[in-house]
Amino acid sequence: MSNKKVDEETLRALRHDIKNQLSSIHLALETLRYEITDPTEDFNFCIETIFNSAAKINELLKEPE
């Protein structure tokens, strides 16, 4: 096996693991959104910031075509 093949497989596995964690974060944020009945402006800001950061990470993980 060449080093390039190992690196590609390692990157694919890493992307997969990170995306799974991002899915957990997304689900937890959605749950918080519905559990908090009267969220403050700061709470909403924090939730949106985390959502946006997770989305950016997800974009970075997309495999090049």
Image (tube, helix red, strand yellow):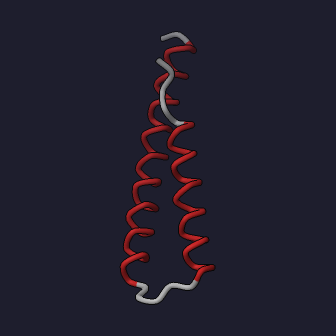
The vertical placement of 37 against 12, above or below, is below
From the viewer's perspective, is 29 left or right of 40?
left
Q: Nearer the viewer, residue 59 or 38?
A: 38
The vertical placement of 23 against 42, above or below, is above
Q: Nearer the viewer, residue 51 or 18?
A: 51
Among all residues in the image, which is located at the extreme front?
A: 41
Displayed quadrant of residue 4: top right
Label count reads: 0
From the viewer's perspective, is 45 left or right of 13?
right
Q: Residue at x 46, y 53 (%)?
A: 22
Tell me where residue 36 appears, x and y as whole percent: 43, 85
Tell me where residue 10 appears, x and y as whole percent: 50, 30
Q: Residue at x 53, y 53 (%)?
A: 54
From the viewer's perspective, is 52 left or right of 17?
right
Q: Residue at x 52, y 59 (%)?
A: 51
Displayed quadrant of residue 28: bottom left
Tell me where residue 27 appears, x and y as whole percent: 38, 64
Q: Residue at x 38, y 83 (%)?
A: 35
Q: Nearer the viewer, residue 15 or 56?
A: 56
The vertical placement of 5 against 42, above or below, is above
Tell me where residue 44 appears, x and y as whole percent: 55, 74
Among all residues in the image, which is located at the extreme bottom?
A: 38
The vertical placement of 19 against 6, above or below, is below
From the viewer's perspective, is 29 left or right of 43?
left
